[in-house]
Amino acid sequence: MFPYLRVKDAAAAINFYCSAFGGKEKFRLTEPSGRIGHAELMLGSLILMLSDEYPEYEILGSQSGGTGCAIHLHVENADVMAAQAVAAGATMLRPLADSFYGERGCALRDPFGHEWLLGHSIEVVSPEEMQRRFTAMFA
């Protein structure tokens, strides 16, 4: 389970979390425009994920009135877990799909307003290959 922060200025947030909490940046995926689509920081033995806001997907940080944080839950089978969550009362926000970064997943909102990102690995992809694929999406 990983906390996933959405912020207005991911580059500034990365600098802050590294300075304030001794974080070490593992990698980041950056659009040609400079917007950070995903970054991972090590805070001790824990991983913190974060990205810039994506208003076009209703991904907003707390400064913009969004939840500011989602929970990324790695599971054995995202399809099964998503069906179980929806049956229990969750709302599907983004349907299950295979992604360029080697994960099959979806986004759900629980009945209490929290967003969950469910996913399972479908291939191992290096940060360099993720960046190549991410950049190609904007070509």
Image: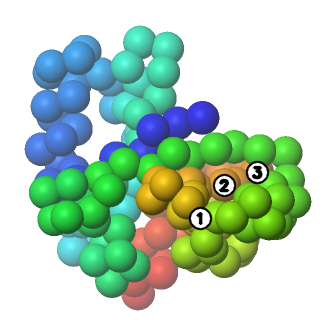
Residue found at x 85% / y 45%: 76
Q: Alpha-carbon neighbours of circle 2 within 10 Å: few (<14), some, or many (≥20)? A: many
Q: Position of residue 42 (x, y in %)?
A: 41, 24
Q: Is residue 124 left or right of residue 126?
A: right
Residue found at x 35% / y 76%: 58
Residue found at x 61% / y 71%: 91
- According to the picture, the residue beneath numbered tag 3 turns out to be 121
Mark 3 or 1 closer to N-term? 1
Mark 2 or 1 closer to N-term? 1
Q: Residue 37's image quarter?
A: bottom left
- According to the picture, the residue beneath numbered tag 2 turns out to be 118
As displayed, is residue 110 above or below residue 49? Answer: below
Residue found at x 33% / y 83%: 56
Q: Position of residue 110 (x, y in %)?
A: 57, 58
Q: Is residue 77 left or right of residue 115?
A: right
As displayed, is residue 76 above or below residue 122? Answer: above
- 96 or 27: nearer the viewer: 96
- According to the picture, the residue beneath numbered tag 1 turns out to be 108
Could you tell me if residue 129 is visible in this image? no
